[in-house]
Image (tube, rainbow, N blue to C red):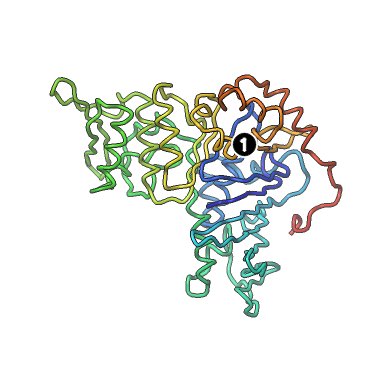
């Protein structure tokens, strides 16, 4: 899992540090930078896949759009701390150049021994303690993503897999989910545009499990099916049962909430290590939010969501909420920052007589952001951090 993220010079973020739990919920005012944080994790994933240009095109972005307007430093700096299933921890560091679309410097540190097990800088790279080799090819994103498995250690392969398996669905859209799709795929697509194809590929136990979970939200839904049409296009239908009569409903007539739940369930049944959802409550009836929160907490993947809904927080225990809920705010200079919401003394005290959601509603987020800016921010250092000019 991803234990922590440090990101600098990306969109509204000038310098942010945040810790993650297996389930993490981001809250804050509109424009605070919650979506930017999800996008930063998505960028890290695509750096490790080596397909940054295609990622930018899918979002209709230009590389210059990634740069924070709050700083003159050009490179985007990313540090990720990763904990493997073995319990071992590693830190991946990268300096991403927006002009070359590549990481001009990169490092992986074994946090047990504090040894650097991968290093890339100034046109050369080394694996472990081996002698450095010249980088004699052009590459996009992370150099680590382009090296053959045979020359990498098991630890480096595990770090690469952990980061490249992050999937962001902050663009999830019922309009896209209703569309037919053709290509075979490993996920539903960032906006849900590949939902029909993904569901078409599900077989056996995984499909049965998905249908069973869907019934917990919508008891009338007994199944779904996909039909392959000409040229391989797949079309999605949901099957409902009323008075022993089965009714097939085409995707274009399925309500937004059911489509979102189906997409979320499908993705949490996939093999990704981390999934990201923006405004998880959108289009979903409050009566089924409790089931959704329980499912996300029990999902096999690490899950990060953003929300404006106190209902999401109300279905977290106090113990979970104290670790899982991060307050995202803008500093006095405009940069996005993060602080554990219930580590703030006056908010934590409210848990003595309120639920997490009630404490959230009872708090002025505008006032809280100003308080956090005063409490948590250190005077800005004028010294540029090492590595930001590479």
Q: Is residue 302 left or right of residue 19?
A: left
Q: Is residue 241 left or right of residue 217?
A: left
Percent across and percent down for residue 76 are 68, 50
Quadrant for the C terminus in the image:
bottom right
Q: Residue furthest front?
A: 352
Q: Residue furthest bottom?
A: 131
Q: Residue furthest left?
A: 244
Percent across and percent down for residue 290 are 43, 28
SS type, badge 1? strand
Percent across and percent down for residue 13 are 69, 41
Reading the image, the residue beneath label 1 is 326
Q: What residue is rendered at 32% in x and 40% in y?
A: 181
Q: Nearer the viewer, residue 350 or 72?
A: 350
Q: What residue is rendered at 31% in x and 39% in y?
A: 196
Percent across and percent down for residue 383 are 85, 51
Q: Nearer the viewer, residue 97 or 271?
A: 271
Q: What residue is rendered at 52% in x and 59% in y?
A: 84
Q: Is residue 91 above or below residue 345?
A: below
Q: Nearer the viewer, residue 177 or 15?
A: 15
Q: Is residue 30 above or below residue 169?
A: above
Residue 291 sits in which quadrant? top left
Using a 10 Å C-alpha cutoff, classify the residue at mark 1 as few (fewer than 14 neighbours), some (14 to 19) or many (20 or more): many
Q: How many marks?
A: 1
């Amino acid at each position: 899992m991803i234990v922590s993220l440090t990101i600098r010079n990306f969109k509204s973020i000038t310098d942010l540090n945040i810790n993650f739990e297996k389930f993490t919920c981001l809250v804050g005012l509109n424009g605070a930078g919650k979506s930017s944080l999800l996008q930063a994790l998505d960028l890290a994933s695509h750096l490790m896949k080596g397909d940054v240009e295609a990622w930018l095109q899918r979002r209709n972005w230009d590389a210059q759009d990634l740069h924070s307007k709050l700083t003159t430093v050009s490179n985007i700096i990313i540090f990720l701390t990763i904990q493997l299933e073995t319990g071992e921890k590693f830190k991946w560091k990268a300096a991403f150049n927006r002009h070359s679309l590549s990481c001009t410097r990169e490092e992986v540190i074994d946090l047990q021994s504090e040894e650097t097990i991968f290093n890339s800088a100034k046109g050369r790279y080394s694996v472990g303690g081996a002698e450095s080799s010249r980088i004699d090819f052009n590459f996009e994103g992370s150099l680590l993503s382009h090296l053959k498995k045979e020359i990498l250690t098991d630890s480096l392969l595990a770090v690469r897999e952990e980061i490249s398996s992050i999937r962001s669905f902050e663009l999830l859209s019922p309009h896209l989910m209703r569309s037919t799709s053709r290509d075979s795929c490993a996920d539903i697509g960032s906006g849900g545009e590949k939902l029909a194809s993904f569901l078409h590929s599900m077989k056996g136990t995984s499909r049965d499990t998905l249908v069973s979970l869907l019934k917990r939200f919508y008891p009338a839904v007994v199944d779904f099916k996909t039909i392959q049409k000409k040229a391989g296009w797949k079309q999605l239908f949901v099957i409902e049962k009323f008075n022993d009569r089965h009714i097939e409903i085409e995707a274009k007539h399925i309500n937004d909430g059911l489509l979102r739940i189906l997409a979320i369930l499908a993705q949490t049944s996939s093999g990704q290590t981390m999934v990201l959802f923006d405004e998880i409550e959108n289009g979903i009836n409050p009566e089924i939010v409790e089931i959704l929160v329980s499912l996300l907490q029990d999902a096999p993947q690490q899950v990060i969501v953003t929300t404006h809904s106190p209902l999401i927080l109300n279905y977290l225990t106090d113990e979970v909420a104290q670790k899982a809920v991060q307050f995202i705010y803008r500093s006095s200079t405009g940069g996005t920052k993060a602080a554990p919401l219930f580590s703030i003394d006056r908010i934590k005290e409210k848990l003595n007589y309120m639920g997490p959601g009630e404490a959230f509603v009872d708090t002025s987020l505008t006032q809280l952001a100003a308080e956090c800016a005063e409490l948590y921010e250190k005077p800005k250092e004028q010294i540029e951090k090492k590595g930001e000019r590479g």
